Amino acid sequence: YAQANTLILSFQPEVSTLARLQKLIEMAQEDGKKIIITSRSPTFREASGKPVFDWYIQSRNSASPYSSTELNRHFYKRLMRRDEKIDPQLREISSRYNIHFLDRTKIVCDRGQKNCAATTPDGYKTYYDNLHWTVEGARYFGQEMIEQLKFDQAEAALKPSNAIDSDVINPEQ
């Protein structure tokens, strides 16, 4: 904490934890820290008692081969909407404290295309279960978050009052 310039607050908050989150933000801002809050991580309903990926792979046979497009659409269909209660509150807190909000659902899922990334571009499974990322998934989604922060920074440059400092997106620091 002492040596960090930027804190990324990323967890699965509940309504009861939001007051503590605000106290943490206030403390960090008093210490001169830059802060990014992320939304809740997207979670997926199980399929026949199994994580969606495992269910899909095990349900395939020679007559119905694996399709990453179909798998990504199955993930989207099983996307739980838990974030719709908490994320607006996280956005409001971010706005109130003038800190950046990063929507992890937008990193994982494309609501317009109605799919979620079940695999990395290299074909690795992104979720270990219905909530937790695999190591490969964390690498892939982490890179996607960096790209989103760069995009957000470019967009914020058009609105100077909402600018994000460039060292926030430099993973080398």
Image: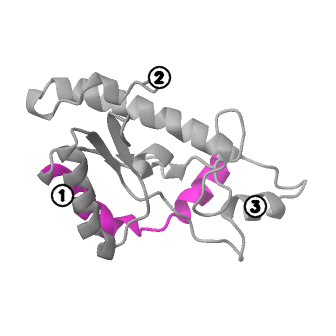
| Depicted 101 relative to depicted 59: above or below | above
Tell me which residue sits at (54%, 63%) in the image. Answer: 77
Disc number placed over residue 54 in the picture, else none: 3
Judged left or right of residue 119, residue 29 is: left
Judged left or right of residue 124, residue 166 is: left
Taking the view exactly as shown, the residue that stands out farthest to the left is 161
Q: Of circles 3 and 1, which is in front?
A: 1
Please report the bounds of the magenta region as a residue range: 69-95
Element marked by disc 3 = helix
Q: Position of residue 137 (x, y in %)?
A: 62, 44
Q: Position of residue 17 (x, y in %)?
A: 32, 70
Disc number placed over residue 172 in the picture, else none: 2
Of the image marks 3 and 1, the number of the one nearer the N terminus: 3
Element marked by disc 1 = helix
Q: Position of residue 82 (x, y in %)?
A: 41, 69
Q: Nearer the viewer, residue 171 or 60?
A: 171
Of the image marks 1 and 2, the number of the one nearer the N terminus: 1
Does residue 133 belong to the magenta stretch?
A: no
Taking the view exactly as shown, the residue that stands out farthest to the right is 62
Neighbourhood count class around disc 3 (C-alpha, 10 Å): few under 14, some 14–19, many 20 upward: some
Q: Are marks 1 and 2 in contact (CB under 8 Å)?
A: no
Q: Which quarter of the image is occupied by the C terminus?
A: top left
Q: Position of residue 19 (x, y in %)?
A: 23, 69
Q: Looking at the rendering, which quadrant does residue 50 occupy?
A: bottom right
